[in-house]
Image (cartoon, rainbow, N blue to C red):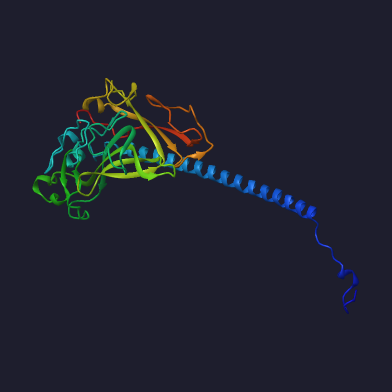
């Protein structure tokens, strides 16, 4: 064999890999790749679990905090106003446990707190068809109070024409639409009275509804919703937080007037049905069950049951496609006591 000038003799005879060596190298590569894939999939699953748990905690805490803040404000009207004597261009409406789609719901101020037990029947403002906001399950909790806008009718920012407001001094109150703020029938101040305050009336009815979103398997993503008073003075639907699967509440009743809870009842129970009985509520216990938005493959929480108020809720998850859930509880003392005869 002719030798090429400048090329070492050893380089002219370089044998390649044998078939056996190639097979061994391929097997080793597959093992290494499989290990890396397993690590990747494990890390991804761990991240998904931690992300889901983080969302469950965030949603649960937000829901409890939102409900707690509203419950603490329930029945705040300003001063020592006897709310049952409130008048104005709009009159107070007796609360019969309903929610019409008009301004009357926002004027049912004789119940600072009320509710329905595992139904929305009678609350026509809560959708029962369609998707977004449709009632799914659980209790309905309604809370009412006024948000103060301090100052008199001259210095207070412009009122929205159709929104509902409450004007009150220490003893008297007027209910009106924003466009009627200057009407004589809504006036309170005289030279003998102290300051008055202008407040926006708020009514909020919490419940579990259909978010309008679907998982890949077609399951509904539930959310905590609330009906609120809109700019028109009528109830409108608002989503509070998604991923809330169930909601229950019980009410602490002080039947003897000593400012201590004598017993906890559900809405509609004997002893908690009439307006007079609802006025004896001084505390509330609530249960909020959060849920992962979509199911996890291989998770099978069959038989899981959650004690929530007067029920034990057993989710109907499909085998092998379960949802992670966390249960949150809270107790709230209602700060705004109803004055005697108020």
x 24%, y 35%: residue:
123
Task: Residue 341: give x, y in percent of width and height.
Answer: 19, 28
Residue closer to the observer: 160 or 314 = 314
Residue closer to the observer: 143 or 332 = 143
x 64%, y 46%: residue:
38
Task: Residue 150: give x, y in percent of width and height.
Answer: 25, 49
- Which residue sits furthest bottom? 5
- Which residue sits furthest front? 1
Residue closer to the observer: 137 or 17 = 17
Task: Residue 158: give x, y in percent of width and height.
Answer: 20, 55
Residue closer to the observer: 340 or 334 = 334
Is residue 87 rendered to the left or right of residue 222?
left
Q: In the image, is residue 273 above or below residue 108?
A: above
Q: In the image, is residue 99 above or below residue 31?
A: above
Q: In the image, is residue 40 above or below residue 274?
A: below
Is residue 235 rendered to the left or right of residue 221?
left
Is residue 311 rendered to the left or right of residue 148?
right
> What is the quadrant of the C terminus in the image?
top left
x 37%, y 37%: residue:
68
x 43%, y 39%: residue:
60
- Residue 195 in sight here: no
- Residue 36 in sight here: yes
Q: Quadrant of residue 172?
A: top left
- Which residue sits furthest left? 184
Is residue 181 rendered to the left or right of residue 70?
left
């Amino acid at each position: 064999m002719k030798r090429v000038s400048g090329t070492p003799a050893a380089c002219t005879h370089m044998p390649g890999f044998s078939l056996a060596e190639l097979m061994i190298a391929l097997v080793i590569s597959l093992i290494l790749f499989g290990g890396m894939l397993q690590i990747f999939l494990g890390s991804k699953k761990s991240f998904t679990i931690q992300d889901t748990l983080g969302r469950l905690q965030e949603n649960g805490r937000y829901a409890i905090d939102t409900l707690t803040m509203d419950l603490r404000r329930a029945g705040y009207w300003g001063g020592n106003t006897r709310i049952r004597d409130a008048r104005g261009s709009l009159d107070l409406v007796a609360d019969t446990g309903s929610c019409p789609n008009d301004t009357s719901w926002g004027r049912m101020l004789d119940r600072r707190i009320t509710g329905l037990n595992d139904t929305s029947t009678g609350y026509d403002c809560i959708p029962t068809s369609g998707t977004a906001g449709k009632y799914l399950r659980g209790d309905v909790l309604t809370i009412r109070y006024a948000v103060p806008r301090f100052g008199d009718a001259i210095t207070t920012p412009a009122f929205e024409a159709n929104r509902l407001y409450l004007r009150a001094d220490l003893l008297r109150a007027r209910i009106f639409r924003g466009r009627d703020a200057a009407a004589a029938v809504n006036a309170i101040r005289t030279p003998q009275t102290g300051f008055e305050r202008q407040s926006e009336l708020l009514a909020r009815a919490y419940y579990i509804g259909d978010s309008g979103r679907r998982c890949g398997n077609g399951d509904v993503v539930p959310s905590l919703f609330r009906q609120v008073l809109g700019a028109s003075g009528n109830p409108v639907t608002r989503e509070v937080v998604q991923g809330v699967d169930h909601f229950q509440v019980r009410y602490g009743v002080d039947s003897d007037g000593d400012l201590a809870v004598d017993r906890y009842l559900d809405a509609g129970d004997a002893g908690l049905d009439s307006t007079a009985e609802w006025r004896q509520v001084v505390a509330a216990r609530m249960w909020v069950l959060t849920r992962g938005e979509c199911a996890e493959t291989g998770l099978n929480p069959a038989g899981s049951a959650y004690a929530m108020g007067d029920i034990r809720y057993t989710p109907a998850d499909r085998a092998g496609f379960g949802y992670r859930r966390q249960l949150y509880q809270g107790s709230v003392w209602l700060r705004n006591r109803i004055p005697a005869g108020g």
